[in-house]
Image (cartoon, coloured by chain):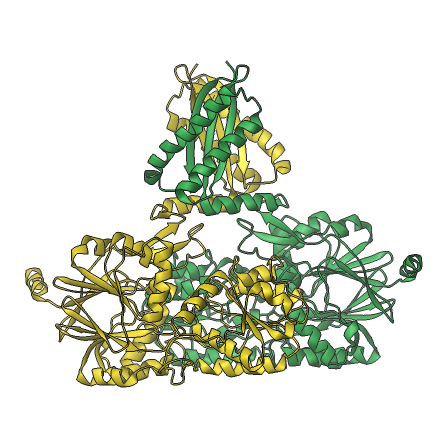
Chain colours: A yellow, B green
Amino acid sequence: MKKKKNKEAAAFHGVKIIPIGGLGQIGMNMTAFEYEDTIMVVDCGMAFPDDDMLGIDCVIPDITYLVQNADRVKGIVITHGHEDHIGALPYVLKELNVPVYATKLTMGLIEYKLEEHGLTNIVRRKTIKHGQSVNLGCFRVEFIKTTHSIQDSAAFAIFTPVGTIVHTGDFKVDYTPVFGDPIDLQRFAEIGKKGVLALLADSTNAQKPGYTMSESTVGHTFDTIFADNTKSRIIVATFASNVDRVQQIINSAKKFKRKVAIEGRSMVNVVKCAESLGYITIPKTMQIDIAEIKNYPPEKVVIITTGSQGEAMAALSRMAAAVHKKVQIVPGDVVILSSSPIPGNEKSVSKVINELSVLGARVLYQDTHVSGHASAEELKLMYALTRPKFAIPVHGEYRHLMSHAEIARSMGVDKENVFILKCGDVIELTADEARITGSVPSGGIFVDGLGVGDVGNVVLRDRQVLSENGLIAVMITINRITGELIAGPEILTRGFVYVKEADSLMDEAYDVVSDVIDEIAKRRISDRTKMKGMIRDALSDFVWKKTKRNPMILPVIMEGED
Amino acid sequence: MKKKKNKEAAAFHGVKIIPIGGLGQIGMNMTAFEYEDTIMVVDCGMAFPDDDMLGIDCVIPDITYLVQNADRVKGIVITHGHEDHIGALPYVLKELNVPVYATKLTMGLIEYKLEEHGLTNIVRRKTIKHGQSVNLGCFRVEFIKTTHSIQDSAAFAIFTPVGTIVHTGDFKVDYTPVFGDPIDLQRFAEIGKKGVLALLADSTNAQKPGYTMSESTVGHTFDTIFADNTKSRIIVATFASNVDRVQQIINSAKKFKRKVAIEGRSMVNVVKCAESLGYITIPKTMQIDIAEIKNYPPEKVVIITTGSQGEAMAALSRMAAAVHKKVQIVPGDVVILSSSPIPGNEKSVSKVINELSVLGARVLYQDTHVSGHASAEELKLMYALTRPKFAIPVHGEYRHLMSHAEIARSMGVDKENVFILKCGDVIELTADEARITGSVPSGGIFVDGLGVGDVGNVVLRDRQVLSENGLIAVMITINRITGELIAGPEILTRGFVYVKEADSLMDEAYDVVSDVIDEIAKRRISDRTKMKGMIRDALSDFVWKKTKRNPMILPVIMEGED
């Protein structure tokens, strides 16, 4: 019986789809497609660290499998220029130098990253237009125009030997985008008519009923706010990458005859990039440097800035904390937060709003944002157009994937043809059948400073203990040969309690340690590990009894030369 | 001119109101009222720590001013039994043993706290009924029935020599509460008719337009969910303190003939307390122990549990992580989160929802919660009934206080009679006038384990550094007299990088430190502080260059005996 099954499995031969990231959590989107000698990858994103990943800068996908099969990897195609889709590129390309394909603005944003990492001259890359295709081994990948909260986003139709697979990337159905064409629904329909084997679509807003509003609706809100506040300076914080949002702020500024100053490193970079590529238009006479705002009356100025998520180092947070060098918030200022907090950022956003309010600013943070992701009805539209045999929800937390799966079933995909995968799962598709046939290494690799992957769970656990209760170090020096005490014990604490309070406590701790050392001498214990263990246990018990705290106890036994 | 002003200030003699906590942030509510030889205090709450208060258990108000004037403090009156109004009582009563006055359920919950801290026989306390008054020095305090997300909440009419001050506590206008009488609007109106000098009202939902829904609406939602899921086990997580919510779950369970098991320490405690005092009714035959659930078919059981905020140690989180000893989540289970995430908890709540979904549970977390705080229109009603001369918004973040201030002005309070105070501000009221006349020490005191106030900013900063990059300790032992090196250098890291990765790096670090020690010897430096500084600087530079990280560097110089 078992043998037969194995035989069958051996005979089963299809296109493999391997989500390397982007499932079960937000960020780090990366999916591999494989058939015989061809592997191609869609997106290469990073994730921002969770609260318990202390000190970590960002998280990138584990590409062990791709590196092991480097000779077969033909290239990476990118759906759009958000960090969770391009952020890991510099790290991955250092390990795996394959060509990168993307649309113009997306490529422009990638260029910045490559430059920062000194990879400009090493990485091969090609800009693709919507409607064009790229041949990658036995796959042909067509770029289809979509709409999202960044310009130039694309979905992919991947033509494989077993059938056509559609990967939507992040998308919404925007009939009236601020710039460029709406999503190319006709092409999705045309491909769907010819037959789609599998659909991998964006799950982020699958739990939201109805439709996501058009980006252009935000423009009307800006106009209203500008009209209501003709006597105030206006400061708008939004995502740097939301080029269309920035354009709409500029449009309102133009209507109300205000100068525009751009502030915040990523905002300046993205606007420069988008402007040079023609994705954003700022009349020459309108743009002023942030240093020049003092030369204009407040009611003639708009500042567009980063920091809408309350990020501690971003420009808006510095303004709110009154430490920004060029912008002082004064009573009467109107500050618009044109974004909604990403889960986990709610408290920092609140803090910034409160600080701005204390300084006298009026802070508006409702109704000036729309999502960039398809709600339930838009997902249904995508299913109606493509009519896939198999559905593989991507992009989202587990609960979002679950809701997406329900939508897929409600749109006629067979229950057993909807697959909720885990990162690293290998699903294999033939024209008739899909099976999970294996798994590859997956998960996040921590980036901390220059280190990639050198911080793991042990280190994080240590940081956790240190962060909660600090440490107590106990040092003694003993004679290498006789084992006699030469120096110490010395006791030292950091992050534990006030030195003043610690004084008497540490006197007692000194006695506790001294007693242990006496016992060690009396029992003639010479094993260093055992000695350390005895010191640690005694001190740990004592401290817990006295304070109900568990600092890290670090016994050090040095050996003297004399 | 200045002299005259001082003279005037000296002549100015009114009732002082001092917000010791509860302004500008959520939690730690405490307000002092003072006139001549009388000080009385309303509420005594704690706050949960912010993300950057590493390792802190809770934060309590700084009562320096009250302790300094202990002989004049006549008592503490409590509005209701939530942690942010009673949580600091055990700590404060240890410093300041004054009588406590509260309604029956509130006192019941206080009893638990006193017992935990061994204060039962020390603290004087008196249970007060709505409508009754307490005389505290020259003040008379009347308890007025209000409605909130916990039973037995009260507002206070404080009759003072200069006029009547109304303090609402946390409240909403619930005409159809689940248990007991609605808010006593007539009494507010009666007192208002006679003249109210100042109103201190709840600002939490001042930014929400309209009215907050009645608690009883949630009962209908429960009934619908129970009717839709007659084949599933139902698990409901909510705030332990929301006794009415728990009652409504029990009511639905009764209608649908399910047994009820209570789980989670605080849920068990609160339900026991509320039941013994008659605030909650569970038919004897319905309640089962959590250990007994296995004796009943799943569709005959409801589990009411703590953990609706995703708290790591709460029962629901343990079920979600599949480590709960008595409840295993199985496919088909329906889990209701009857609460909305408190700001800062969104991510932990998400995590629990995802984990429950992975285990196959259907998680419902919308439409099963209403707020316990008055929205804008209810605040207007309170102003319409009391018609205060002065308005002092309390309870809320700064932005909430600001919105509340706008409502007060829109209801006819003079612009200059609306005061947004900071914690520690002293506002003095006469029958005609209000002035901010001073300030007292205020702010939060950190509680960490058994320690109250022994963790301050230096300790927290150390914990921050340790949490982000760990530490490197460098130890050397030198001869006390000659200064010669006896042992070391020894280098040790925690929370920095993988030991494996650190190996070669630490070899190099060892060389860096050895070079410094050679230099110290050569230059005959004997000042310990200088020696430590040199080691720290050299190592810190080296590590930053190599890793772009800033671990805490801890040089220790021990002196040998020999």
Residue B232: give x, y in percent of width and height.
36, 73
Q: Quadrant of residue B187?
A: bottom right
Q: Quadrant of the C terminus of chain A?
A: top left
Residue A393 or residue A365, whichever sits in front: A365
| Number of numbered discs visible in the structure rendering | 0
Q: Quadrant of residue B152?
A: bottom right
Residue B276 appears in the picture as rendered: no
- Identify the residue at image location x=69%, y=76%: B406
Looking at the image, residue B39 lies above or below residue A152:
above
Residue A370 or residue A25, whichever sits in front: A370
Looking at the image, residue A294 lies above or below residue B529:
below
Residue A376: give x, y in percent of width and height.
36, 80
- Identify the residue at image location x=22%, y=53%: A67
Q: Residue furthest front?
A: A285
Looking at the image, residue B157 lies above or below residue A508:
below
Relative to residue B497, is residue B16 drawn left or right? right
Residue B180 or residue A297, whichever sits in front: A297
Q: Quadrant of the N terminus of chain A?
A: bottom left
Relative to residue A234, is residue A553 drawn left or right? left
Residue A507: give x, y in percent of width and height.
59, 29
Residue B271: give x, y in percent of width and height.
54, 64
